[in-house]
Amino acid sequence: MGARKHNRAEAIKEQRKSTYMASLSNVPTSPRKMRLVADLVRGMNVELALHALQYSQKEASDRLYKLLRSAIANWESKNEGARIENSNLYIKEIFVDPGRVLKRVQPAPQGRAHRIRKRSNHVTLVIDSRS
């Protein structure tokens, strides 16, 4: 490995030490429905986002709640002894990408068939502290 490539790899390692994230793959919800909930909590304080997700009526909010708890646990593992209340954590990034689409066929009248697309998505959540 060349020196420039090595230096870049080391810089990425250092950056990952201060990045706290969690991701969720192949969630069997359409990306459009998941984005509605993701837009609700984007940029929010972590405590407020947990409460908003806990009391939301959307089905996708349960999965995002668990994902946010996972990201907080990742933050706690890298910052032992630090308190969440004092650290001023917020949701820095949250994005929903489309996953695989399962294609099914539903019988229709007069011998026809309609296609059903069962969509899924991938969610990535990054938290950070406001200084």
Image: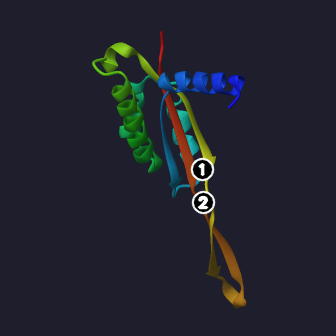
**Looking at the image, residue 128 lies above or below residue 107:** above
> Residue at the bottom extreme?
111
Residue that mark 1 sits on = 31
**Secondary element at tag 1:** helix
As shown in the figure, which amino acid type bears the numbered disc 2?
Arg
As shown in the figure, which amino acid type bears the numbered disc 1?
Pro
Q: Which color scheme is applied?
A: rainbow
Instruction: Work out how far the residue at label 2 is from the one at label 1, CA to CA, in angstroms.
Output: 7 Å
Residue at horizontal 62%, vertical 46%?
Answer: 97
Residue at horizontal 51%, vertical 54%?
Answer: 27
Residue at horizontal 69%, vertical 82%?
Answer: 113
Residue at horizontal 63%, vertical 62%?
Answer: 101
> Residue at the top extreme?
131
Residue 117 x, y percent position in the rendering: 64, 66
Whether residues under marks 2 and 1 lie with C-beta atoms below 8 angstroms apart, the answer is yes
> Residue at the left extreme?
81
Q: Pick the residue in front: 71 or 85.
A: 71
Residue 88 x, y percent position in the rendering: 40, 16
Q: Earlier in the sequence, mark 2 or mark 1?
A: 1
Q: Pick the residue in front: 60 or 77.
A: 77
Can residue 55 be seen?
A: no
**Looking at the image, residue 129 lies above or below residue 118:** above
Residue that mark 2 sits on = 119
Residue 53 x, y percent position in the rendering: 41, 38
Residue 36 x, y percent position in the rendering: 56, 42
Q: Pick the residue in front: 11 or 57.
A: 11
**Secondary element at tag 2:** loop
Q: Is residue 18 left or right of residue 96?
A: left
Quarter of the figure with residue 71: top left
Q: Is residue 19 left or right of residue 7?
A: left
